[in-house]
Amino acid sequence: MSGGLLVAGTTSDAGKSVLTAGICRWLHRQGVKVAPYKAQNMSNNSAVVVGPDGRGGEIGRAQAMQAAACGLAPDLRFNPVLLKPGSDLASQVVLLGEAVDTVTAGNFRELRPRLAQTAYAALAELRAAYDVVICEGAGSPAEINLRAGDYVNMGLARHAGLPTIVVGDIDRGGVFASMFGTVALLDAADQALIAGFVINKFRGDLGLLRPGLDMLHRVTSRPTYGVLPWELDLWLDAEDSLAYGRVLGRPAAPYGTEWLAVAVVRLPRISNATDVEALATEPGVRVRLTVEPAELAAADLVVLPGSKSTVADLAWLRETGLADAVLAHAASGKPLLGICGGFQMLARAIHDSVESRQGSVPGLGLLPIEITFDPRKTVRQSVGSLGGDVPVRGYEIHHGYVSSADPALTPLLTCEDGTGEGAVVGAVHGTHWHGAFESDEFRRRFLTEAARLAGRPGFTVAPATGFAAARERSLDLLGDLIEEHLDTDALWRLIEEGAPPTLPFIPPGAPTP
């Protein structure tokens, strides 16, 4: 088998990432040597990959998840261009894992040819090395204002001759109109590659949906390859769906007699919020993303997660009253955790002439450290322990570093070279390490201590919860859904043979770029 496929979507968060991962897992089960690919991702959720030169680089976390679905270690070529928004107007550009520039609307046109060339070269290498490459688009292919320079959606499909399926989220409403409109807004050459549709997050009687599927086929002459059901267990690595007030996962009943309530501050530029998903896999742990000070007051454990804009998000904390809520929580003696940017916010002072360029600003003052930003970005995988006997693995992605600290400060972790990492003062904890809670024994130790500090003696960690196993179950569930609900024979033909040559043009279409 050889070939490729582009999974496009009617909108962001339509289900492109999970559909791509599911198709990858299905093909992997068939013995196909398959790889994922996304030419350009815009996300502050990233994973660290060790490149061929031994240095750490970044790719979108969704592509790392898709690599796991393929049974592969992450590869920088799986996501050659990563844009990390630092504000509404500017994003850091990560090219093959390395931060190389900052892009705005004004200079993106100048940089785009270089990005496209790198993306196309990466895809060519992957197609030479793998039987099949399943590509994920970005946003919608019908963003016609961006079509002229597109190298992620139909620009990529045209360049590589990729048949394309369009996935739509029926839970949002308007799925048939958005699917028809997606095709009808494309020019004839783009439409010739749109082979059909997949509907995502359907709840109810499929018979009630059938007339709409039949009409969509009549007006587009393109089939719907399947209807994926709403599935509550698909929440790990959910890149685009960290909504305000959302409870992560499906909290299982406590192993002991009490729940542990965790409130995670939903920062405007939150990054790697997936850190707290590991906490949410534990029975009796309820993890909520929030922007409400009252929910911090009611929580047992408060988490300040990573941020792409530490100083700006710290100012937002103060403007919204959340900073006062964090300080009150710490003053009560209940546990507080800062991760990466959240850790930096806990410092006495932050000296930033790199990211915000605001110079020195006061931190929350809960840890006796100062943070200084360096133009060189730390991107690496990290190995260490808690107390010398609990192994911990994580990864680091940050410009800020601890430039001064109280000599008597207790580190949270010990690195494999013997140096300390992070800090603990009473119930206040901080670390630069992302992903540490995926280490099962460390997570259990931390939650046990958090419950003690919060006055929850009835909370007991379950003895056998495994985060890696939970992720594998999620990926297997995706593969199961593809096999059960999609026409896999038709998908197989599409991947091998390309888009059918007789697909009609749907007016009005866009002018040829």
Image (tube, helix red, strand yellow):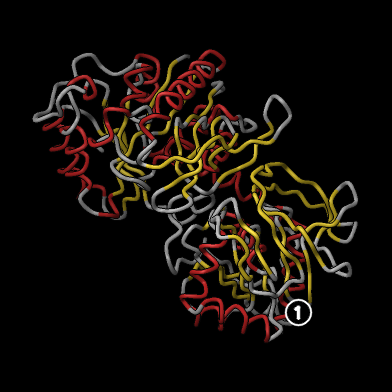
- Measuring 68% from the left and 85% from the top, which residue is drawn there? 331
Left/right of residue 485 with respect to residue 365 in the rendered view? left
Quarter of the view holding residue 505: top left
* Residue found at the very far bottom of the displayed protein: 332
Residue 238 x %, y %: 48, 51
Residue 376 drawn at (x, y percent): 66, 42
Outermost residue on the left side: it is 508
Q: Helix, strand or loop at disc 1?
A: helix
Residue beneath the point at 25% across and 17% down: 500
Q: Position of residue 379 (x, y in %)?
A: 67, 42
Number of numbered discs on residues: 1
Task: Give the amino acid at mark 1.
Answer: Arg
Is residue 13 or residue 109 the one in the foreground? 109
Lateral position of residue 486 relative to residue 403, left or right: left
Q: Nearer the viewer, residue 9 or 70?
A: 9
Q: Left or right: where does residue 334 sit relative to residue 315?
A: right
Q: How packed is label 1: few (under 14 Cα within 10 Å), some, or many (20 or more)?
A: some
Q: Quarter of the image for the C terminus: give it.
A: top left
Above or below, 290 relative to 1? below
Image location (x, y in percent) of residue 79: 52, 32
Determine which residue is flagged by label 1.
452
- Residue at horizontal 37 percent and vertical 27 percent from the top: 151
